[in-house]
Amino acid sequence: MALARRRLDAVIVGAGGAGMRCSLQLARAGLSVAVLSKVFPTRSHTVAAQGGIGASLGNMTEDQWLWHMFDTVKGSDYLGDQDAIEFMCREASSAVYELEHLGMPFDRNPDGTIYQRPFGGHSANFGEKPVPRACAVADRTGHALLHTLYQCNVAAKTQFFVEYMALDLVRDADGDCLGVVALEMETGQPVLLESKVTVLATGGAGRIFAASTNAYINTGDGLGMVARAGLPLQDMEFWQFHPTGVAGAGVLITEGVRGEGGILLNSRGERFMERYAPTLKDLAPRDFVSRSMDQEIKEGRGCGSERDHVMLKLDHLGAETIMKRLPSIREIALKFADVDPIREPIPVVPTIHYQMGGIPANLHGQVIAPADGNCEAVVGGLYAIGECSCVSVHGANRLGTNSLLDLIVFGRAAGNHIVSALGRGSAHKPLPHDAADATLSRLAQLDSRPSGERTQVVAADLRRTMQAHCGVFRTGALLAEGVRMVAELAERAAQVAINDKSRIFNTARVEAIELSNLVAAAQATIASALARTESRGAHARDDFPQRDDANWIKHTLWYSDGRALQYKPVHLQPLSVATFEPKKRTF
Amino acid sequence: MIAETPVSAPSPSVQGGVARFRVYRYDPEQDRKPRMQDFEVRLHAHDKMLLDALMRIKAELDDSLSFRRSCREGVCGSDAMNINGRNGLACVTNLRDLRQPIVLRPLPGLPVVRDLIVDMTDFFQQYHSIKPYLVNNTAPPERERLQSPKQRDELDGLYECILCACCSTSCPSFWWNPDKFVGPAGLLQAYRFLADSRDEAGAERLDNLMDPYRLFRCHSIMNCVDVCPKGLNPTSAIGKIKEMMLRREI
């Protein structure tokens, strides 16, 4: 079969906030850019972000980027790279103003400026008190951001390849990335997209867990592609539990609820966060709140007949505030929890939400990997931005509102870097003759396998295994057993069969390919978690309950080929200010 | 269809029970014409929404059943379909509110790609045709442009659209003229930019809709309002565009 080919300056895989912020930069610079997406761009998971985007605009009370930086470093449990964090927090205000100029319909203050609300872990004056830093569009900030970026890309005439799934990177003997092989879902045809630069903006792999706030499409496709290409994944042991997923359903309830004044209660009706975090209380960072909730549940103060969740109370905010600032939360509570939060509390439980780790990248978005003694050598032609990347600005625990910020700041930074790199003039390198062979043979094997397990049987086992062995409670024994089980699941995943033989919009085929990516993300996660014998941020080991700064201020690198984990130093030196030295985290 | 859809009597709770389906099937590679297929699926304790049941059918009974889905919480707009004669999102449609067998068809009026997946090209072309982006050629200030809360309130009920197409594909005017009539979703967004105090292209936006078809094919039958899963009101927005045009004439 002749393989369809397209040649472009840049290919961006993923049309969420990061991908579309980057594509906007490239399209406006006149480059030929193709954005590939498994779903129509406005269906990308950025759309589900609710509470806000962090920037020290200081519209409500005094604020400074340095305070934002301090909170982010402390929030990361000192695993974040302080140069990248400084860059992000300094760029935040201009990036948010730019979104406003692009048309994003931010909520407003009486003086006409952007409305900001408090959020977990964000404080004034280095931890003194909560500060309103989350720039909000009601509780639909991600929706407003994603639609605004799509609209601006329409204006800039960005080329979208809608419902194309990227399958593999194409690299040459030098290791440079020359494009991707993708699948056009509607026709079932593979296509080779040749490009001078390839940007991965594929989002997280939150679907490796059974209880997740993530969309079905969050299968870590970029992580799978990178792992198959022999490149490492970084800090994959760090997965954020969002404190407030609707119990049983997993649907997200924004931290903005607590930003607006909502509080968490245990079965005794006690506001327990006052005990754990006397200053920030319910607005402590997510790892801290989630662990406190688990502690309450573990000690028998959970709510409901199973005593397995706590309550989020917001009725005291009043119907007017709820309808104005949190309208979608009310809708979600009515639909998924059968409660009206104007009158009753919402049952909530910590739920997998965000992948702090990912494809190692520098602050220009360039993918980096150890080579020739340099642990941060640039991989030619390849960028990674957004949740799929690890810059690392989130370290061991991300602060709320910093994910949307990450998308915008590094989407723009990568865009600028690409524009200037391609502006210096470069040609397409020759493609290796076997560029697509491995991918096509993998597809052919899947299509021709006469019998085997169903994809979703294996996927469900994978999610259950990860939840049970690599969830809130992690111990060496649980993790070691989990590593063995995931290895077995990897073998089963390689042998799944699909009954659907049609070429037309074959979603069974897509799900089987997604499973291979989920497996890579799960293997990276659980192997990295087993090795890290300390508790830091979202990674909590019952058998190693303390943070171990002497041995573990370092980033994990995992490779899919079974070689031992590698480690590299954390950047403790910021760009222009003094280092924030690791301290015990109290809130 | 749709406009006069009766509210079906809630069936006994189906969570944990069996749900019965009649689903539209069509694969252009295998089928000469569409057919309806029956399914019975045993639900698990947490299967609450229609999408949960569809995912279970696909995972356990028939992996060839094809539909779009993503966020499973009513914000991405992927899983719009015709459910017991009425357009809606599978992920926020509670199974207990549906009469069985639950009859599922693709959104009406658009070409079917396969099963419940429709070709949305016409729908998005109409959306693009209204220039769905802010136009402001004045150099922006260093900080945000100011907008009063009252001016910002004008955008409520407009910007929240998720482009699911439930509205436009329940509109007879859009069925007959998907290439000429912008349709309720596109017009709602046209008004979203007309109503934005920061936008400078009001006159061009109105010119762009001055046409016997693009705007004026709306006959206010309000199917769009009836089915919108986000509770938005395109008919009201269309009325406001017509008022703006009228005011401009005098």
Image (spheres, coloured by chain):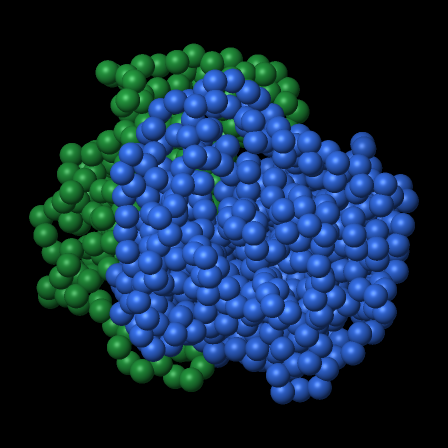
> Residue B111, percent across and down?
24, 31
Where residue A569 appears, as percent x and y from the top left, is: 71, 70
A126 to A550, vertically: above or below:
below
Name the one closer to the observer, A541 or A65: A541
Quadrant the C terminus of chain A occupies? bottom right
Q: Which residue is drawn at 39% across and 57% down?
A: A178
Q: In this view, does A581 lie to the left or right of A114?
A: right
**Residue A116 located left or right of residue B236:** right
Note whether residue A118 is visible: no
**Residue drawn at the location 72% of the way across and 54% of the way down:** A565
Residue A377 visible? The answer is: yes
| Residue name at image x 39 percent, y 22 percent | A501
Image colour assigned to chain A: blue
Q: Tell me the quarter of the picture where residue A285 sits.
A: bottom right
Q: Which of the 4 image quarters holds residue A84?
A: bottom right
| Residue B197 percent location from the top left of the image | 33, 70
Closer to us: B206 or B249: B206
Count all numbered tags in the image, as a single digit. Answer: 0
B235 to A566, vertically: above or below: above
Chain for colour green: B
